[in-house]
Image: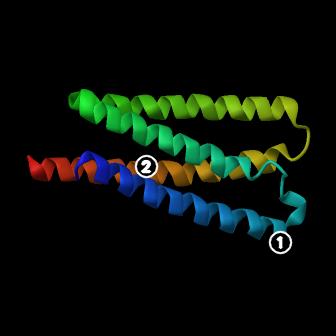
């Protein structure tokens, strides 16, 4: 895959994944367990969507400027994602009193969904690179 097709592939599939997960999980909880729905839920898919854009942008920049450091950038973006996740959870726990456990649980579910997709995507990218070489 060339640079633009890789980014397009990631953005299209990541957008679909976040939209489907966001539109499935949130309304399901609100409908069947409304006592567990937190009003900050819509922030969670938005956070992970923005971070997905950050990840693919860093990946594309590295691929153009220093392709030998792609694995390092991948690990670096994962470390930044963990730090920002912890920061968001810390701020939420300090500022918002209600439904902390539910928010943390929803956040963790989206974190896992995001992590699995990104891992699959970059694994597939590396396999394609090995075949080309």
Residue toward you, 88 or 33: 88
Q: Residue at x 70, y 52 (%)?
A: 106
Residue toward you, 30 or 43: 43
Image height of 8 relative to 31, above or below: above
Q: Report the residue marked by disc 2.
A: 118
Secondary element type, mark 1: helix
Image height of 82 relative to 48, above or below: above
Residue toward you, 22 or 75: 22
Graded by Cα atoms within 10 Å as few (under 14), some (14 to 19) or many (20 or more), the crowding at tag 1 reads few
Q: Residue at x 74, y 52 (%)?
A: 42
Q: Report the residue marked by disc 1.
A: 31
Splitting the image into 4 quarters, where does residue 36 fall?
bottom right
Image position of 14 (left or right of 34): left
Q: Position of residue 95 (x, y in %)?
A: 86, 31
Image position of 26 (left or right of 82): right
Q: Position of residue 53 (x, y in %)?
A: 49, 43
Splitting the image into 4 quarters, where does residue 65 fall?
top left
Mark with earlier residue (1, 2): 1
Q: Residue at x 90, y 61 (%)?
A: 35
Residue 57 seen by the camera: yes
Secondary element type, mark 2: helix
Residue 123 seen by the camera: no
In three-dimensional space, the C-alpha distance between marks 1 and 2, rounded to whole angstroms, equals 30 Å
Q: Position of residue 71 (x, y in %)?
A: 30, 33
Residue at the left extreme? 133
Residue at the bottom extreme? 32
């Amino acid at each position: 895959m060339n640079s633009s097709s890789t980014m397009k592939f990631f953005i299209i599939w990541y957008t679909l994944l976040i939209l489907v997960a966001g539109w499935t999980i949130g309304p399901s909880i609100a409908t069947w367990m409304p006592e567990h729905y937190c009003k900050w839920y819509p922030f969670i898919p938005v956070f992970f969507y923005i971070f997905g854009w950050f990840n693919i942008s860093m990946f594309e920049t590295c691929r153009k400027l220093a392709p030998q450091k792609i694995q390092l950038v991948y690990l670096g973006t994962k470390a930044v994602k963990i730090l920002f996740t912890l920061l968001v959870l810390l701020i939420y726990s300090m500022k918002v009193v209600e439904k902390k456990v539910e928010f943390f649980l929803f956040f963790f579910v989206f974190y896992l969904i995001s992590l699995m997709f990104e891992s699959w995507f970059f694994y597939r990218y590396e396999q394609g690179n090995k075949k080309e070489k």
